[in-house]
Image (cartoon, rainbow, N blue to C red):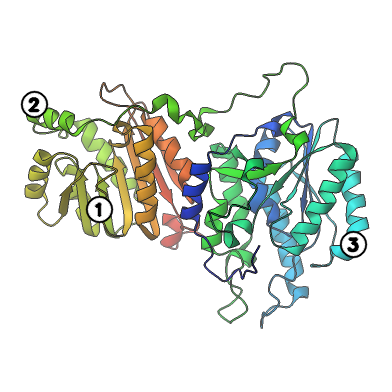
Amino acid sequence: MPAFDHRDPGTSAAAWATRLHELDLPVWDGWRHATDVVVLSPHPDDESLGAGGLIAAAAAAGIPVEVLLVTLGEGSHPDSPTTTPEELAPRREAEFVDAVGRLHPTVGYDVLHIPDGGLDTERAGIAERLRAAVATAGSRPLIVAPWRGDGHRDHRIASELATALATELDLALVEFPIWLWHWADTDDATLPWAEARIVPLDAAAHGAKIAAMDAYPSQTEPLSDAPGDEAIVDHHHLQHYARRFEVLFPNGRALGLEPDGDPDAGAAADSDTDTATDAATADTTSRSKESFEDHYRDHPDGWDFGSWYEERKRRVLLAALPRQRFGSVLELGCATGVLTERLADRSDDVLGVDIAEAPLETARRRVPAARFERGTLPDDWPSGAFDLVVMSEVGYYLSASDLDRVIDHLLGSLAPGGSIVACHWRHADDHATTSAEFVHRRLLERWPGRRSIQHVEDDFLLDVLVPADEASVAAVDGLTG
């Protein structure tokens, strides 16, 4: 592992999203079969960044969770000209208590008050506290600790202590990476991906994790404008931890963790947390260009865009946009430009792309201020960087592999701080190769930020995906505290 500085840009969350999709890591749900979960967290926020979703999901399922906080992380800003470690310690402890409560009200905790950076000299005491916590944790305890190769000395020592106890008592252990996402290259062949698993997060667990991360402003925001007071986990870092799943390294005992009685108990995951491994069931071919051209030959106006249903859907989509105005907007599958016209009112520049030429001729007449290109996705991807990408009623016409390539292009084309809006019809379509649910799930699996809006109704799905640190509309308008 090379030396790293948290102030460096590091490897982007978008690059990791693509790499993790390529790896197609197996799902691990052994936590469902634990009697208790004991988390060893070297510093305040390690527990939320690395395993907050797992903690929230386990607690919500009725599994007792206890977090052992080793230090108060008072040494996080050694060069601060404004805040001493003695001043930072109680602030970080209060943030930790708030964060744990946000993960779930039932999560317990114990603060060991070891000096920050002092784990090596306090190994015996930490090991004793961990052993005591595990001793009361039922017949199938699960230990959760930082990954041994994370590159931070305190993380390594915590991992060594947890691993030693798990080995001695034959206990299940999972390790979570944190700084790996910053310093590692996506093509690093030395990383132990064969050992890695993912834990999908349902909406409740994901929301709890985001809320817990928000409880640490001493780490996610600058202490002041002075050099040395920079954010430790800034918005670039936060995107690594805002995924809809967590990456863990389980030991062999954790991989073999099974419930008593019914071997299938708890094995069925919520449909919202299914992973990309089901793609093969839908990987036919994308709807052809000729099929769309035939449709427009028979239906020049497209898909009843003048109906009340379509007008209402457009109003819902436009009302859901996370900003009042955007610089550049890309609309995939713009058809005759009915939505493009409304997007043009909310942006400085809008580009509409469609597979067929006939609707584009209509779109150019309707919205002369907009730009339009004919292209077959994913091969003919437009150039440029975009503040907003709208994917409406097009994703389910793509094969699973073509959809993945579109998402690759999409993530690479977003400008910093860019957002995605996806909207799709939920009813049957003879020409669709997948479904609205499949498309939106696939987007969420790859998105490194968070979902600010999920709108589900009988006829369509609407998801708005924004960066992890995107402020709410009310916050931007100064209406929140």
Q: CA distance from mark 2 to mark 3?
A: 77 Å
Q: Nearer the viewer, residue 189 or 338?
A: 189
Q: Which element type, helix, strand or loop, lies under badge 1?
A: loop
Q: Nearer the viewer, mark 1 or mark 2?
A: 1
Q: Residues within 10 Å of mark 2 (few under 14, many from 20)?
A: few
Q: Residue at x 22, y 55 (%)?
A: 350
First in sequence, mark 1 or 3: give its number.
3
| Residue under numbered circle 2 | 298
Q: Nearer the viewer, mark 1 or mark 3?
A: 1
Q: Which element type, helix, strand or loop, lies under badge 3?
A: helix
Q: Position of residue 47 (x, y in %)?
A: 70, 51
Q: Which element type, helix, strand or loop, lies under badge 2?
A: helix
Where residue 122 is drawn, which disc sits there? Answer: 3
Q: CA distance from mark 1 to mark 3?
A: 57 Å
Q: Nearer the viewer, residue 167 or 469?
A: 167
- Please tell me in which quadrant of the rendered image residue 185 appears: bottom right
Side of 87 where 323 appears, left or right: left
Look at the picture and state if 185 lies above or below 174. below
Q: Amino acid at mark 3?
A: Glu
| Residue under numbered circle 1 | 382
Q: Residue at x 69, y 55 (%)?
A: 46
Q: Residues within 10 Å of mark 3 (few under 14, many from 20)?
A: few
